[in-house]
Amino acid sequence: MTSRSLHPDTVAVHAGREDLTDLGVHAPPIDLSSTNPLPDIETGGSAYETLASGGYPEGTAVYARLWNPTVARFETGLARLEHAEAAVAFSSGMAALTAAVLATTRETGRRHVVAVRPLYGGTDYLLASDLLGVETTFCEGTSAAVAAAIRRDTALVVLETPANPTLDLVDIRSVVMAADGVPVLVDNTFATPVLQNPLKFGAAMVLHSATKYLGGHGDVVAGVIACDEERAAALRRVRAVTGALLHPLGAYLLHRGLATLPVRVRTQQANARAVAAWLADHPDVARLYYPTDDHPLIGRQMDGTGAMLSIELRGGYDQAARLTSAVQVFTHAVSLGGVDSLIQHPAALTHRPVAPEARPDAALVRLSIGLENPTDLITDLDRALSVNGHVHPPLTAIRSRIPDLQT
Ligand SMILES: *Cc1c(COP(=O)(O)O)cnc(C)c1O
């Protein structure tokens, strides 16, 4: 049976492990070779040529900057989960974005990028800077705004949905239509392939900061792009020459992380729904940023509301500062998507490099909900918020109103 006919939960466990039984092993081997023996000069030279132009190893992998089989196992797993022909892994999400921009602009001679705001702060900053030699037009996620921003020399459209940190949902299909043939890259870090497969809606490339949900345990920094074989070859050419490689030990951990990804994401999502329901009518919360069930893209584009949420506090920056310092179960730290819950202040941290007009409000904090018991998470927030003197209905009084909350 090919893995294409299998449920994604099964693919997550088995993809990239197809040859293990023949190898007589149960866990994927980790290949740490920086170089590989060459059968003879001719074979070595031609394998080098093929790999440097973005192809697959023939006879020898030559050198680890060109190819690594442990990294390839993770790439296979992620490609299957995104319903893509291929995936290419990098040393970080930002390295993956850099490669996507270089592959689409330098190789086509077009130098213009359209970027839908809001975006992860690092992405926004990189595209706004002239570091990669591109000019970027930022716009809203409506088809009219995207269509107006597209130029004859536009090489790439970049969007994020759900977006960071407001959890705005962008209609991928309508942006793809408005892009009128220009490839659209979707940053799928927040949704993961468990909840959303952007290629199904016409995206050309799907980017993940694998540092987040894919790894899921806060111990690997990595990025990956899933796409068709032609674009993957272009990305491998850039990777081979710029060297933004994922180390095989990190690739092993990410590949292992994929096996539990569906279970983690669904449980984290259920926990986030409970936390969001509790925060929704908290007197200190001026605004909750979390997709609602009746949003037209929930169920159509994204299978659920995800496990990330943000809140704007009535007490502004001062209350945000007190809350982030007072939590005990949550960790005050940037990053997201791991088994443990994190809380952070985007304006001061993840979105610090963003231009002032696009920077999040100082009263906003972002929460990444983990696998802890949701009652413990709510109790932690309740205690940390009541440091401010407010009295909120005790948990027991609201428990019946939160369907996802189990004890
Ligand atoms: C973290 C993040 C990135 C950058 O990834 P790194 O692995 O930190 O380089 C890009 N996009 C989103 C949505 C992120 O959360």
Image (cartoon, grey):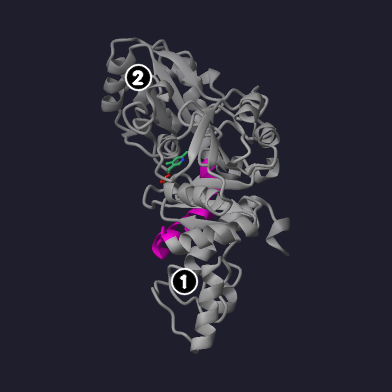
Binning the other alpha carbons within 10 Å of mark 1 as few (below 14), some (14 to 19) or many (20 upward) gives: some
In three-dimensional space, the C-alpha distance between marks 2 and 1, rounded to whole angstroms, equals 47 Å
Q: Does the numbered disc 2 mark a residue whose Cβ is under 8 Å from ligand 1? A: no
Image location (x, y in percent) of residue 273: 53, 28
Q: State yes or no: discs 2 and 1 in contact (Cβ < 8 Å).
A: no
Element assignment for label 1: loop
Q: In this view of the protein, which residue sits in the foreground, 74 or 18?
A: 74
- Write the residue at 49% across / 87% down: 41
Binning the other alpha carbons within 10 Å of mark 2 as few (below 14), some (14 to 19) or many (20 upward) gives: some
Image location (x, y in percent) of residue 43: 54, 85
Q: Amino acid at mark 2?
A: Ala
Residue 37 figure quarter: bottom left
Q: Amino acid at mark 1?
A: Pro
Residue 182 figure quarter: top right
Image location (x, y in percent) of residue 175: 65, 33
Residue pointed to by mark 1: 29
Element assignment for label 2: loop
Tag in front: 2 or 1? 2
How many labels sit on residues? Answer: 2
Sequence order check, earlier mark of 2 and 1:
1
Residue pointed to by mark 2: 362
Prevailing SS of the magenta stretch: helix
Q: Quadrant of ligand 1?
A: top left
The magenta span reads: 242-265
Image location (x, y in percent) of residue 53: 55, 67
Q: Is residue 108 magenta-colored?
A: no
Q: In this view of the protein, which residue sits in the foreground, 389 or 405?
A: 389
Find residue 48 and name its label. Answer: none
Q: Is residue 111 above or below residue 4?
A: above
